[in-house]
Image (cartoon, rainbow, N blue to C red):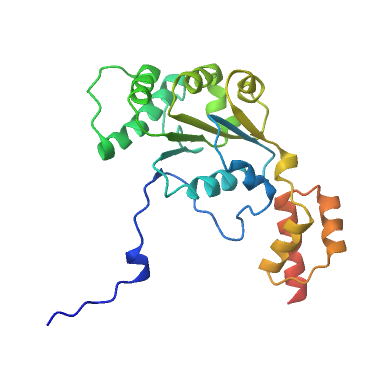
Amino acid sequence: MSIELPVRADRARQPARANLRGLPRVHAASATTHRSFARFARPEPLTVIRAPHGFGKSMLAAQWLRSMQDDDVDVLWLGSDALSFVEVPGAEAFWDILGSRLEEFTTTHRKVAASSARGRERVVQLLSQRTRPVYVVLDRFESTSGRLGIEQSLLDLVQTMEHLYLIVCTRTVTSLEVVGAAVVDSVVVRPADLALGVEDVLGLAAQQGIVLGRDEAQTMCDETAGWPALVRVILAGSAADQV
């Protein structure tokens, strides 16, 4: 007689189809729950998330991409450390790193013919041979990749490579935002889109067990302009006072 052992619920789940590389974890308390997340229901070839520090740009991008883990896509995250180990960071170093990261996906799906091409030329080859979407995230763009003068080259890739989707998180306005909308389907998420509203503040307060009235939440929104980082600091202080 054979005995069938029960299968744990987490073992019974189907494996995720998406291949996620380098995404930051999304802390439940920092997850974006307000209206801006709904704008990511359908991705565009170019997405620019621009806001000052503390508006949750990276967390918003990570939360959105993790929601696609059942889709047949690849996700490649290039953060602030992408060029940190390069002695002389420059455009060629950026393209070499992007190419090597794209090559990591080929071992999973299919082999790409060996090539002597390097830099941007190799990136073009790898992207042109793809058969499923790849989402490339350039985080903290203003302090890393944005200093390399590669905006136009990136736009050219987004225009010509059908399976490439580019997501840029930045604190400053770049030509990607200004020119991008004129040459390719794109979406720009600005500070006003990321600012917290009354319902968002009430939700965050409830998560932390803070008793907060609607008028108090409105006052907090008015005084902080909905700046998520500042709202969380104020709520943390309120939580300490209520203990």
Q: Where the N terminus falls, by quadrant?
A: bottom left
Relative to residue 223, is residue 117 depicted above or below? above
Q: Residue at x 30, y 72 (%)?
A: 7
Q: Residue at x 70, y 72 (%)?
A: 209
**How many numbered callouts?**
0
Q: Position of residue 196 (x, y in %)?
A: 74, 51
Q: Residue farthest to the left?
A: 1
Q: Position of residue 17 (x, y in %)?
A: 36, 48
Q: Residue at x 43, y 44 (%)?
A: 22
Relative to residue 174, is residue 69 depicted above or below? below
Is any part of residue 56 visible from this angle?
Answer: no
Relative to residue 222, is residue 239 depicted above or below? below
Q: Is residue 174 left or right of residue 108?
A: right
Is any part of residue 26 visible from this angle?
Answer: yes
* Closer-to-camera residue (155/88): 155
**Quarter of the rendering containing residue 15:** bottom left
**Quarter of the rendering containing residue 72:** top left
Q: Position of residue 226 (x, y in %)?
A: 77, 49
* Closer-to-camera residue (59/15): 15
Relative to residue 33, is residue 151 depicted above or below? above
Q: Residue farthest to the front?
A: 1
Q: Is residue 74 left or right of residue 226?
A: left
Q: Position of residue 180 (x, y in %)?
A: 61, 22
Q: Where the C terminus falls, by quadrant?
A: bottom right
**Quarter of the rendering containing residue 40:** top right
